Image (spheres, helix red, strand yellow):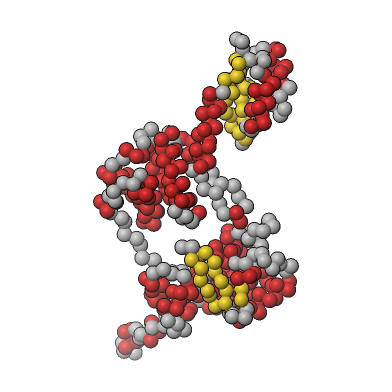
Amino acid sequence: MDTTITLQPLHHRGQESIALYYKNDPGLNRQVRMLPDVKWSQSNKCWYVPLSKKSYNDICTKLKNYATIITGELKEYLEKRKTIKAATVKKPSGSHSKALPASTAWGLNSRNLEALKKLVEQLKLKAYSTSTITTYRNEFMQLLQLLKEKPADELSPDDLRRYMLYCFEKHRLTENTLHSRINAIKFYYEQVLGREKFFWEIPRPKKQVQLPRFFNQDEIAAIIKAAGTIKYKVMLMLAYAAGLRVSEVVAIKITDIDSKRMCIRISQAKGKKDRIVTLSPVLLVMLREYWKANKLNKRGYLFPGQYPGEPYSSRSIQLVLAEAKKKAGVLKPGSIHALRHSFATHLLDKGTDVTMIQKLLGHNDIKTTLRYLHVSNRDLLQVMSPLDDLKLN
C-alpha cells in the first residue's frame, strides 16, 4: 500500500486535535470526509478530528484498507502529555476548576520533564498541601525552563549558587520568592534525588521584617455595616471574631459550629492541624439570623458556593471585603488576613496572654505570634513622649 496518512497532534482554535496529512487522493478524500466530526483547516491545510480515543479508533478502522497510517508523532505527543499531566497539580475538589495550566512544561526536554514529574509525585507522597505543591512546582520549573537541554540532575552546588545569584541580580526577586525557590530546588536534590545536604553552602537572603497590617475597631465596624447582605456580614464577622484565614472561613461546615460549648472546630487548617476557637455570642446571634434567611444543608458548608457541594470561593470573599471597604470609606490596605491580624492585635490590647492567642491562631512557633506585640498599643499608650516634657511656652 503506497498511500500513507501521517497523524500529528494539532492545537487548533483552542482545542487539541488529530491532524491527518496525506497526498491529495480523490478516493481517500471521500473516506476521510466520512469520519465523524471531521473538519477542514484552511490555515493548516489538513483535515482534523478531536483528539480522543474514539476519533483515533475511527481513523484506524475506517482508513486502514485505504492507506498506511503512521502514528509515531502522535504517540510521542501523547506520551509527553501523559507525563505533563502527572506533573500538574489538581486543585481541591471544592474549587470547581481544572488542573493548573501545564502549557509552560511543553518546552522542557524529556529528562527535565521527568524531573518535574518526580518532584510533584514526591511532594504528593509526603502529603504536602496543594498550595505548597503548586509553589514548589512553579518555582522549580523556572530553573528547568532556563536550563533548556541541560539536565537538572547534572547541576553542581556551584551551578545552583550562580543560579540563585542570577535570580537576585537579573530578576530582582523578593526575599520571600527567593526562599520559596531555594526550598523547591533543595527538595528536589535532597528529597527526590537523595543528594547530600549541600544547601548550607548557598546563603539565604535575609527576610524583611514587616509588621502585620490591621484595622482598628471603628474601621471593622464600618466595614461590617457596609457589607450589604447578612451572608457577607457573617463572613467578615467570622473572620474577625475567630481570627481565621480566608481558607478556613470557606472550609467551615455547619456541623463545625457548637453553640452549646460556644466554640468552632477548624478542621485540617494550615499544617494539617485541627484546632478549636471561641464562638462569639454576637456572632452566634448573626449566624442564627443567617440560618433563618437561607435554606442551608445541615451537613453542608456554612457558605455554599455556586455549585452544589462546594464552598464559597476565597477570591469571592476577598472581593466582598474590598467592596465593603470601598463603601465604608476605609482606605487602609488589607485583605481578609488583615482581619485575622486585627483579631490578634485587639486581643493583645485587651491584655490577653500571648500563648492563648498563639493557640487561637494555630501558630506553631510563638515567634510568629510575638509579632503582634510590635503593633499592640497596650504598653505603648503608657509611654510618654519626651516632647511632652519640653517647656515650649
Residue placed at 36% from the left, 39% from the top?
152
Residue placed at 43% from the left, 34% from the top?
110
Count of numbered marks: 0
Say if 112 sits above or below 272 in the image: above
Residue 243 x, y percent position in the rendering: 52, 72
**Residue closer to the observer: 263 or 100:** 263
Residue at the extreme top: 2
**Residue closer to the observer: 260 or 338:** 260
Q: Is residue 100 left or right of residue 232?
A: left
Mark yes or no: residue 27 visible: yes
Say if 135 sits above or below 344 in the image: above
Residue 187 x, y percent position in the rendering: 37, 50
Residue 229 x, y percent position in the rendering: 68, 69
Residue placed at 31% from the left, 40% from the top?
155
Mark yes or no: residue 211 visible: no
Q: Is residue 260 left or right of residue 294?
A: left
Residue 44 x, y percent position in the rendering: 60, 24
**In what quadrant of the picture does the N terminus appear?**
top right
**Residue closer to the observer: 76 or 245:** 76
Residue placed at 70% from the left, 66% from the top?
297
**In what quadrant of the picture does the C terminus appear?**
bottom left
